[in-house]
Image: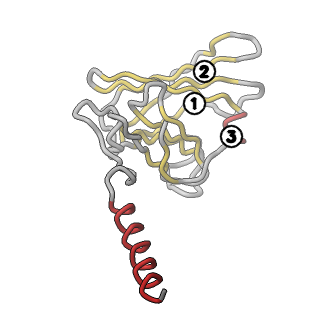
């Protein structure tokens, strides 16, 4: 009986070690040459706590909106936009466009913000009023090379549904 318990416990420990080391049980984060997942989740990093964050419709980019300068120093009356690609790398030199739509009236609001590429995936945006009354849809389109994708935030709802900093998949 003593030998059985000894081998039984040793056997269980070995089984746990083998299962933990097995490639089929491991969570693997990787990417294909095209930047899309091949049965693997693509993870994007949300860097800050009090920001808006989402992954674009087709999973090509993540967009993080830095709303104030409590956690990060971006300046007054401006927002920061942090953009990562499907490899979770900084997107430099992207063309970013904004559309702001009043969801109650169903009309687009003219918006022509000034966008400055600060490098390392950070863009400073001035002239974008996100404190408007009512319900608004903020659409952000990111175009880098031949890869274009977009995300939409419904305000003020998105301000109430912030997620903590961390890693997220689509």
Residue 103 shown left or right of residue 1 in the figure: right
Q: Earlier in the sequence, mark 3 or mark 2?
A: 2
Residue 125 shown left or right of residue 77 in the figure: left
In this view of the protein, which residue sits in the foreground, 114 or 87? Answer: 87
The residue at 43%/30% (across/down) is 59
The residue at 41%/74% (across/down) is 13
Q: Earlier in the sequence, mark 1 or mark 3?
A: 1
In which image quadrant can residue 10 be found?
Answer: bottom left
Secondary structure category for the residue under label 2: strand
Location of mark 2 (residue): 100
Q: CA distance from mark 2 to mark 1?
A: 9 Å
In this view of the protein, which residue sits in the foreground, 26 or 29? Answer: 26
Secondary structure category for the residue under label 3: helix
In this view of the protein, which residue sits in the foreground, 49 or 72? Answer: 49
Mark 1 near mark 3, Cβ–Cβ under 8 Å? Answer: no
Dot label at residue 128: 1
Question: Given the current orientation, which residue lies at the most extreme bottom position?
Answer: 2
The residue at 64%/17% (across/down) is 101
Q: CA distance from mark 1 to mark 3?
A: 15 Å
For mark 1, does the 10 Å Cα neighbourhood hold few (<14), some (14 to 19), or many (20 or more) residues? some
For mark 2, does the 10 Å Cα neighbourhood hold few (<14), some (14 to 19), or many (20 or more) residues? many
x%, y% of residue 153?
A: 61, 29
Q: Is residue 145 above or below residue 118?
A: above
x%, y% of residue 17?
A: 37, 69
Q: Nearer the viewer, mark 2 or mark 1?
A: 2
Secondary structure category for the residue under label 1: loop
Residue 153 shown left or right of residue 32 in the figure: right
x%, y% of residue 92?
A: 30, 38
Location of mark 3 (residue): 159
């Amino acid at each position: 009986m003593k030998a059985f318990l000894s081998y039984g416990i040793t056997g269980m420990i070995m089984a746990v070690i083998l299962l933990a080391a097995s490639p089929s049980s491991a969570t693997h984060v990787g990417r294909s040459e095209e930047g899309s997942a091949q049965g693997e989740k693509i993870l994007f990093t949300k860097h800050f706590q009090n920001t808006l964050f989402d992954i674009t419709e087709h999973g090509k980019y993540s967009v993080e909106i830095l709303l104030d300068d409590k956690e990060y120093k971006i300046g007054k009356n401006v927002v920061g936009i942090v953009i990562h690609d499907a490899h979770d790398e900084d997107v430099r030199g992207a063309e970013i466009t904004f559309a702001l739509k009043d969801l109650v009236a169903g009309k687009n609001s003219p918006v022509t913000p000034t966008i400055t590429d600060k490098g390392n995936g950070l863009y400073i945006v001035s002239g974008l009023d996100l404190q408007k009354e009512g319900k608004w849809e903020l659409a952000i389109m990111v175009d880098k090379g031949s890869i274009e994708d977009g995300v939409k935030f419904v305000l003020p709802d998105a301000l109430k549904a912030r997620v903590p900093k961390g890693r997220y998949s689509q």
